[in-house]
């Protein structure tokens, strides 16, 4: 929203004393107040003498808002949110009806009529509806998803950055980062995700508030105590946000394993000094970008960030008291509902994960004919394309690709699924036509193969860790599966498409944000919130801001660390490679983060970085790994930091506190990661071998090493110029497609184009090799039930329980998986019965025929190019 409408910035909460419906909005009738309660999700309140603060607040704001200002707000909203895919379509239609009615003389001359208020047929209710819709936009949020997990007011006196919050941040970042780093090299791996940590933060915070003494000191009239009183919602959010930064692991760990292990490169020069410089550079460079992106992806209202709303919902359920309501027959509180769901899922998850694994991999169609190759290739969950209407009863399984089916907007899931279906037909066409010899390989794998259909062994083309041309010519080039070829084609297309199309569609918003950024760079004293007048920006403007130059300083620091890393150690990486990683992220960061912020869809730059560096520095696997670590991680870390900034924005955590907390958590993460990593490298026997006793087989590290050889040592020129030159045309396709897509978006039928997201359709191609439709079909079904049907038919229930349900299911799975892992899987105690064996029987269980054609049946015993003539 623009600044043409100016509202008061004093949004202090309604008095804590109980307020009855008669004490607020005294100029409104009881029916009008009930209309407001219903519209704001409080229609089921059982005690109208004790209103929730947010309900009393909104009644007051509706009463105070002049009709003339309400109309200006609605006019601005109708323009600003006109092409906003997340803005409720029904509300937009209602706004247009209210605006049209306001300009109708015939309507104004007939105030006594009754009828549909959305059409403005009754003037008294028309005025109320106009003021109500305008008040929701101007004083809370235009999105029901956001209103469900945030307050429309703020109390700046609530403790946030406390001693006990920092104690919790330190303890759980150390535990979370340590566990993640230790077990990320194991298959299956285990982690302590932030949604599980949230559950432990709550009782520990309460415990510290009860037992810590009220010791402190006073500076300039402000008292600082290690126990300032009851544990608060803001402390819980502050700790949660900071911990989530530190527990996600450091991508550079893969790089260091590949460098140090004798099984891979075995370089002894990769000492702790090199490791520290590299991890500080990769983890903090994204942080520097995050500050610059605030005006584009945090402050704008349209940057909703749907995937982090369940985190807000969980902490709200744990920390916020609520009044008794009956909503669609439900009166259970969010707090109790969360623990019911959490406990139920904790128990239920034992079935699909351990006791009855067919419930997880429900590849029932292959059970009909386990040895039918075509059936397994099309419908199989393990080796096939997963075309199956009912594929799982396991929440963990269905959230592997579409991570948040109860948070990601319905249109986003649909667009991605359409792309996945189109990709399936492309893969089938490529495979059954045996195009580029794909028929001799498994249909849907990310593995590489030789010309005899055997797995490609990188070690066969290396001598002392370096590429050996003679061995390569005697062995085989790497061949890709049909799904892998389609996947790479989609990657090559989505990079140019995302930049061009996002710029075309979001140009006005991006231009306005860049304008604000330019003003800020010219005048460092200018408020970062200048130009942003939505409720949350007005609330956050009370707090001291983090200057842009602080973030730029972090960016410079990380850049210096990266340069020192490659200049002080024999990393074989030119300095320009670091600036290349910086530049490519600067170009792609805005469209990538905007897409993620609005739709919940995310993809990385790893393939593009590998391709460009592979061409620019052929034969240099170490340089590729270093630049890839920067190129991929800058965007990933920036996404993480920015989404956390938006979470703090919604929960009114002061920016300065967040900056200090995120910096501290990241530093802790860096040192804990390096400590655990070096201990593992020194103490775990046979680490990263396929037969390692505790299953520390390092699948991610092996992939990282293989990629460094294939893209860095062998190089993409041999593969994409010699074997698969057609794939390069996908860049041109991706550059040209935005034109017709933009034209259709602007001039096509509104009921279709409103939800048309072509970037997500291309993104749907990316699910394959090795995953497939079996992972996304159930998520689509769940998304339809909750994000479309229930959201429309039972909106009050949805606003109260949907995100709590999502948090409870995910937390239950995470906690249950930890218990299952240590109790029955770390030292395997398998249950041998039909329900655990049938998902892995026959071809879809990796048994028997795995390719449509047999290379050994060919006259020469191989397919493809002749030995000695490989590119």
Image (cartoon, grey):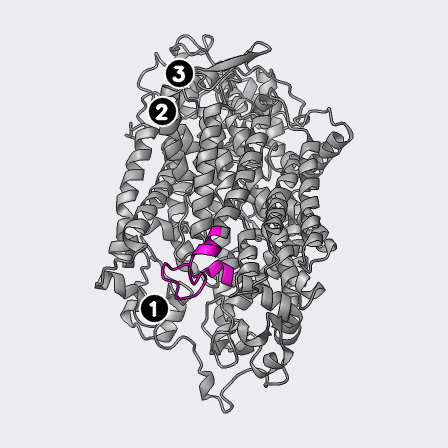
Q: What secondary structure do most residues of the magenta stretch adopt? A: loop
Element at badge 1? helix
Depth check, mark 2 against mark 3: the one in front is 2
Mark 2 and mark 3: Cα distance apart in space: 44 Å
Depth check, mark 3 against mark 1: the one in front is 1
The residue lying toward the viewer, choosing from 256 and 868, is: 256
Which residue is pictured at 44% across the width and 65% down the height? 689
Element at badge 2? helix
- Count residues near mark 3 (Cα–Cα under 10 Å), then give few for <14, some for 14-19, many for 20+: few
Mark 3 and mark 1: Cα distance apart in space: 63 Å
**CB-based contact (under 8 Å), mark 2 and mark 3:** no
Badge 2 is on which residue? 207
- Is 250 placed left or right of 840 in the picture? right
Image location of residue 355, percent across then percent down: 24, 55
Query: In the displayed image of the protein, which residue is found farthest to the bottom?
Result: 859
- Count residues near mark 2 (Cα–Cα under 10 Å), then give few for <14, some for 14-19, many for 20+: few
- Count residues near mark 1 (Cα–Cα under 10 Å), then give few for <14, some for 14-19, many for 20+: many
Badge 3 is on which residue? 31
Looking at the figure, which quarter contains the C terminus?
Answer: bottom right
The residue lying toward the viewer, choosing from 839 and 670, is: 670
- Is 855 placed left or right of 521 in the picture? left
Tell me which numbered mark, 2 or 1, is placed earlier along the sequence.
Answer: 2
Image location of residue 795, percent across then percent down: 40, 33
Where 58 sits versus 802, above or below? above
Mark 2 and mark 1: Cα distance apart in space: 49 Å
Badge 1 is on which residue? 845
Tell me which numbered mark, 2 or 3, is placed earlier along the sequence.
Answer: 3
Say if residue 414 shows up in the picture. Answer: no
Tell me where the magenta segment starts and ends, as one range: 679-702
């Amino acid at each position: 929203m623009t600044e043409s409408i100016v509202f008061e910035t004093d949004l202090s909460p309604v008095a804590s004393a109980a307020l009855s419906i008669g004490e607020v909005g005294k100029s409104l009738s009881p029916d009008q107040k009930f209309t407001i309660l219903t519209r704001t999700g409080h229609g089921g309140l059982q005690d109208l003498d004790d209103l929730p603060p947010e309900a009393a607040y909104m009644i007051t704001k509706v009463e105070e808002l002049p009709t003339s200002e309400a109309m200006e707000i609605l006019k601005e909203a109708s323009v600003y949110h006109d092409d906003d895919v997340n803005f409720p379509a029904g509300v937009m239609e209602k706004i247009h009806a209210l605006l049209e009615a306001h300009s109708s003389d015939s309507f104004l001359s007939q105030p006594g009529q009754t009828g549909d208020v959305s059409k403005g047929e009754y003037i008294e209710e028309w005025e109320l509806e106009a003021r109500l819709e305008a008040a929701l936009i101007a004083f809370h949020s235009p999105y029901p998803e956001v209103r469900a997990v945030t307050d429309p007011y703020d109390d700046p006196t609530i403790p946030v950055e406390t001693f006990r919050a920092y104690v919790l941040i330190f303890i759980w970042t150390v535990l979370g980062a340590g566990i993640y780093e230790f077990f990320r090299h194991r298959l299956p791996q285990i982690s302590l995700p932030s949604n599980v940590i949230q559950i432990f933060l709550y009782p520990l915070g309460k415990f510290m508030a009860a037992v810590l003494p009220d010791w402190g000191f006073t500076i300039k009239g402000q008292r600082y105590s290690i126990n300032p009183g009851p544990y608060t919602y803001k402390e819980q959010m502050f700790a949660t946000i900071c911990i989530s930064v530190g527990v996600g692991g450091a991508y550079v760990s893969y790089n260091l394993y590949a460098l140090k292990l004798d099984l891979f490169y075995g370089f002894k020069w990769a000492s702790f000094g090199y490791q520290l410089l590299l991890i500080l550079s990769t983890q903090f460079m994204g942080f520097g970008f995050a500050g610059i992106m605030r005006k584009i992806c945090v402050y704008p209202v349209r940057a909703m960030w749907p995937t982090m709303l369940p985190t807000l919902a969980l902490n709200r359920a744990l920390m916020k008291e609520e009044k008794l309501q009956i909503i669609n027959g439900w009166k259970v509180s969010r707090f109790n509902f969360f623990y019911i769901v959490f406990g139920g899922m904790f128990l239920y998850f034992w079935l699909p994960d351990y006791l009855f694994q067919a419930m997880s991999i429900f590849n029932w169609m292959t059970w009909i004919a386990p040895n039918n190759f075509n059936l397994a290739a099309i419908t199989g969950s393990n080796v096939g394309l997963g075309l199956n209407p009912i594929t799982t009863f396991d929440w963990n399984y269905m959230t592997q690709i579409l991570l948040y089916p109860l948070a990601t907007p319905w249109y986003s899931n649909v667009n991605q699924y359409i792309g996945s279906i189109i990709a399936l037909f492309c893969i089938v066409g490529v495979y059954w036509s045996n195009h580029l010899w794909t028929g001799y390989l498994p249909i849907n794998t990310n593995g590489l193969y030789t010309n005899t259909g055997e797995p490609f062994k990188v070690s066969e083309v290396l001598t002392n860790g370096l590429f050996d041309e003679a061995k390569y010519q005697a062995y085989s080039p790497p061949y890709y599966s049909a799904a892998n070829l389609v996947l790479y084609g989609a990657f090559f297309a989505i990079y140019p498409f995302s930049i061009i199309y996002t710029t075309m569609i979001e140009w006005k918003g991006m231009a306005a944000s860049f304008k604000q950024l330019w003003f800020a760079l010219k005048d460092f004293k200018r408020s970062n919130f200048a130009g942003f007048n939505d409720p949350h920006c007005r609330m956050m403007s009370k707090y001291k801001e983090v200057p842009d130059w602080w973030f730029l300083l972090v960016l410079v620091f990380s850049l210096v660390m990266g340069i020192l890393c490659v200049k002080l150690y024999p990393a074989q990486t030119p300095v320009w490679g670091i600036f290349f990683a910086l530049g490519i992220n600067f170009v792609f960061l805005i469209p990538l983060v905007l897409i993620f912020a609005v739709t919940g869809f995310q993809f990385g730059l790893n393939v593009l970085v590998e391709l460009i560096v592979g061409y620019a520095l052929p034969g240099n696997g170490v340089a590729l790994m270093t630049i890839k670590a920067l190129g991929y991680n800058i965007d990933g870390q920036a996404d993480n930091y920015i989404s956390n900034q938006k979470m703090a924005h919604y929960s009114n955590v002061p920016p300065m506190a967040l900056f200090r907390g995120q910096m501290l958590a990241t530093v802790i993460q860096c040192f804990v990661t390096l400590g655990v990593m070096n201990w593992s490298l020194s103490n775990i026997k046979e680490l990263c071998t396929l037969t390692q006793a505790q299953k520390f087989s390092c699948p991610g590290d092996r992939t990282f090493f293989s990629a460094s050889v294939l893209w860095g040592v062998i190089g993409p020129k041999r593969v994409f110029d010699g074997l698969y030159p057609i794939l390069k045309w996908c860049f041109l396709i991706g550059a040209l497609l935005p034109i017709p897509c933009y034209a259709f978006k602007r001039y096509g039928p509104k009921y279709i184009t409103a939800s048309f997201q072509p970037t997500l359709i291309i993104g749907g191609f990316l699910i394959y090799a090795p995953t497939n439709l079996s992972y996304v079909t159930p998520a689509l079904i769940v998304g339809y039930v909750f994000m479309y049907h229930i959201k429309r038919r039972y909106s009050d229930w949805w606003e109260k329980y949907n995100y709590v349900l999502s948090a409870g299911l995910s937390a239950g799975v995470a906690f249950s998986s930890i218990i299952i892992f240590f109790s029955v899987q770390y030292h395997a105690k398998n249950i041998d019965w039909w329900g655990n064996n049938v998902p892995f029987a026959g071809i879809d269980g990796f048994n028997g025929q795995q390719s449509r054609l047999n290379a050994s049946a060919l006259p020469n015993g191989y397919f493809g190019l002749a030995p000695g003539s490989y590119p």
